[in-house]
Amino acid sequence: MNSPEQSLSDMVVERVGFGIFVLDRDMNVLMWNRFMQDHSGLSAEQVVGKSLFAHFPELPRVWLSRKIESVFQLGSF
């Protein structure tokens, strides 16, 4: 059961007017908000748990992987 604060946070993430997604170190999608669904044409069910590159092979894999890894190492972006 979610706390009221968590429920509010989840609602804000879903309704905000820009894309929010969360990746793990293996570049698997952990969260995909409504904006991302609307603008990519892919539902959260389609992408969560799968590699970002499986759905977007045109992304610069090496460059993006390095950038994401630096976020994990530094703890900020």
Image (cartoon, helix red, strand yellow):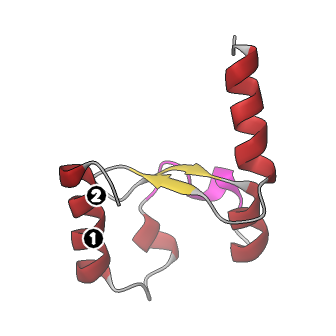
At x 69%, y 10%, the residue is 1
Q: Specify the farthest residue to the left.
A: 73
At x 71%, y 59%, the residue is 43
Neighbor class of circle 1 (other Cα within 10 Å; few <14, some 14-19, many 20+) is few
Q: Secondary structure at mark 2?
A: helix
Q: Secondary structure at mark 1?
A: helix
Using the image, determine if residue 66 lies above or below residue 59. Answer: above
User: Which of the numbered marks, if any, corresponds to residue 71?
Assistant: 2
State which quarter of the image contains the C terminus. Answer: bottom left
At x 70%, y 21%, the residue is 5
Using the image, determine if residue 3 lies above or below residue 77. Answer: above
Q: Which residues are magenta?
A: 43-50
- Left or right: 27 as drawn, with respect to 22: left
At x 21%, y 53%, the residue is 74
Percent position of residue 27, x then y: 35, 59
The part of the image, by quadrant, that contains residue 52 is: bottom left
Residue holding disc 1:
67
User: Which of the numbered marks, if any, corresponds to residue 16?
Assistant: none
- Left or right: 16 as drawn, with respect to 68: right
* Amino acid type indicated by mark 1: Lys
Residue 68 within the segment the image draws in magenta: no
The part of the image, by quadrant, that contains residue 39 is: bottom right
Residue 48 within the segment the image draws in magenta: yes
Residue toward you, 42 or 17:
17
Asked if the residue under mark 2 is in contact with the one under mark 1, i.e. CB atoms within 8 Å, the reply is yes
**Cα distance between the residues tagged 1 and 2:** 7 Å
* Amino acid type indicated by mark 2: Val
Please count the marks in the image: 2
- Left or right: 62 as drawn, with respect to 41: left
Residue toward you, 44 or 35:
35
Using the image, determine if residue 36 lies above or below residue 31. Answer: below
Neighbor class of circle 2 (other Cα within 10 Å; few <14, some 14-19, many 20+) is few
